[in-house]
Amino acid sequence: MVEAVALELRCGYAHRYIPFLKDIVDEECEESPRAEELVEKLKAYQPEIPETAVPVVRINFCEDKEMDISGYQKLGSLDETIAKMDAELASETDPKTGMPEKTVQMYFTIYYPDRDQMQELKGKINIGDGNGGIVSQLKNQNEMKLHDESWLNYQKGKGEESFQAYMADLTDMQEHVLPYLQSFCSLEERAPERSVEPTAVSKSEMEAGKTIASVGNEKSKTVETVRKSIHERLKINKEIIAKQQGKDNKAKGVELV
């Protein structure tokens, strides 16, 4: 629970705990003073993103109830699970139409570290069409938006300035963000020790009915180190993969760049 709360805070949802803490304050119980202190800290709380933080995914909705899981999951692990599920569903086709007998829609949010904050990437995929895992499907969707003439003409209709900004975002997504996310999938597959970082919040910091983790002094310290951009972190991750596999072996995902 401590780790789940810490991820909530890291991803920018500290405000969700304020109403509950205020209820504890109003109860005037033993935990009330500590709850009141936490309310004030959360009002001004700014997440500190560790250099070793990795992308996590929250499933917002999934048609398959077994996959409609609450909380945060490692991108690499969920990506692999989705890829296997997609392959299984895609193999079960209707003999008459050749189409998959069943497909599953999933809506999700990926939270990934970039410099000193967690960025959000919302997405929707169709599991069972044979397009692979989360990152693979996002890449296919982005490529379609980059090259589909009807879609591009629609965007051009919004004006030249808007269109150029739109294309710049798509290009950055294709050349940097998606390979960056793929590199973390590769790192998790080949180096388990780089999975989701244990949080810096201890069990002793769980008060107010053990509902939230204290942001603590270490959370409020000024970060003096310069955070690396997503482009710099992508380069570092590629170098780590290369060292793990040897210079002559390309790791999965590196060829996307």
Image: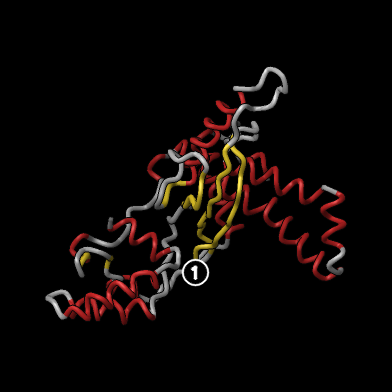
Q: Give above or below for 1 relative to 19.
A: above
Give me the residue at 34% from left, 61% from top.
6
Q: How many marks?
A: 1
Task: Please tell me which residue is depicted at 79% across the width and 51% down the height of the picture.
Answer: 146
Q: Position of residue 100 (x, y in %)?
A: 64, 27
Q: Quadrant of the N terminus?
A: bottom left
Above or below, 102 against 207 in this view is above
Residue 105, how many percent across, how many down? 58, 43
Residue situated in front as seen by the camera: 196 or 78 = 78
Residue found at the far front of this picture: 96
Q: Quadrant of residue 249?
A: top right
129 vs 208, left or right, is right
Name the secondary structure under disc 1. Answer: loop
Image x and y of residue 39, in percent: 30, 78
| Of residues 68 and 1, the one drawn nearer to the viewer in this rendering | 68
| Label 1 Cα neighbours within 10 Å, binned few <14 / some 14-19 / many ≥20 | few
Q: Position of residue 99 (x, y in %)?
A: 69, 26
Q: Is residue 89 left or right of residue 225?
A: right
Which residue is denoted by mark 1 in the rendering? 226
Q: Amino acid at mark 1?
A: Val
